[in-house]
Image (cartoon, rainbow, N blue to C red):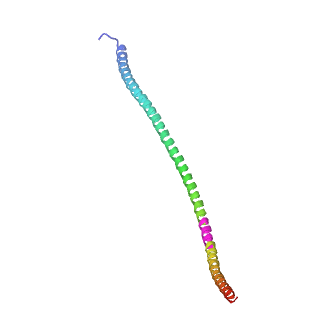
Amino acid sequence: TGQSPIKQPLITVCSDLTDKLEGLKEEVDILRVHNETLKSQHESDVTQVQVLQKEKQKVVTKLEEKDNLYLKTKQSLRQSEEKNRKKDKEKIDLDSQLSKAKSEFSKIDSKYKELVEKEKMQGCKVVEKEKAIEALNSEVTKQQ
């Protein structure tokens, strides 16, 4: 081969370096493709995270609404229970007043019946007295 002894090793070294450079270029291309794939996956992941955050916020909002509704319902129930307790107390008070009124009425009714009975008795006595007076008057009239 008509080359000098120094050129031959340099050509071999250059050829080896060129082969290595080509190999490195292929690796860089593979890494670029892999990097692009990772970037695309990252963008997809970011989008998915945003969608999940929105869904989470919707769920949190619904939970807060339900919690507020629960609290309002619980408060309304407490108010209803309080009103019922007041109504029960009022009913007990009214029942007590009714019982006292019935007792008073019963006493008054008994006294009234007693008075009516006395009046009847006195009425009978008055009628008997009037009959007796009439009889006496008629006797006096006959005797005159």
Seen at 44% across and 30% down, the residue is 43
Query: In what quadrant of the picture does the N terminus appear?
Result: top left
Side of 73 where 117 appears, left or right: right
Asked if 88 appears above or below 113 in the picture, the reply is above
Query: In what quadrant of the picture does the C terminus appear?
Result: bottom right
Q: Nearer the viewer, residue 123 or 59?
A: 123
Number of numbered tags placed on the structure image: 0
Residue that lies at the very extreme toward the top in this rendered image: 2
Is residue 102 located in the magenta-colored stretch of the structure?
Answer: yes
Q: Nearer the viewer, residue 49 or 87?
A: 87
State the image coordinates of residue 63 (x, y, percent, origin top left): 50, 45
Residue that lies at the very extreme toward the left in this rendered image: 1
Asked if 36 appears above or below 112 in the picture, the reply is above
Residue 131 location, quadrant = bottom right
Side of 136 where 2 appears, left or right: left
Seen at 47% across and 34% down, the residue is 50
Residue that lies at the very extreme toward the front in this rendered image: 144
Side of 54 where 3 appears, left or right: left
* Magenta segment boundaries in residue numbering: 93-103
Q: Nearer the viewer, residue 64 or 53?
A: 64
State the image coordinates of residue 108 (x, y, percent, origin top left): 64, 74
Asked if 94 appears above or below 125 in the picture, the reply is above
Asked if 6 appears above or below 106 in the picture, the reply is above
Is residue 57 located in the magenta-colored stretch of the structure?
Answer: no
Residue that lies at the very extreme toward the right in this rendered image: 144
Q: Nearer the viewer, residue 97 or 93?
A: 97
State the image coordinates of residue 22 (x, y, percent, origin top left): 36, 20
- Predominant SS along the magenta part: helix
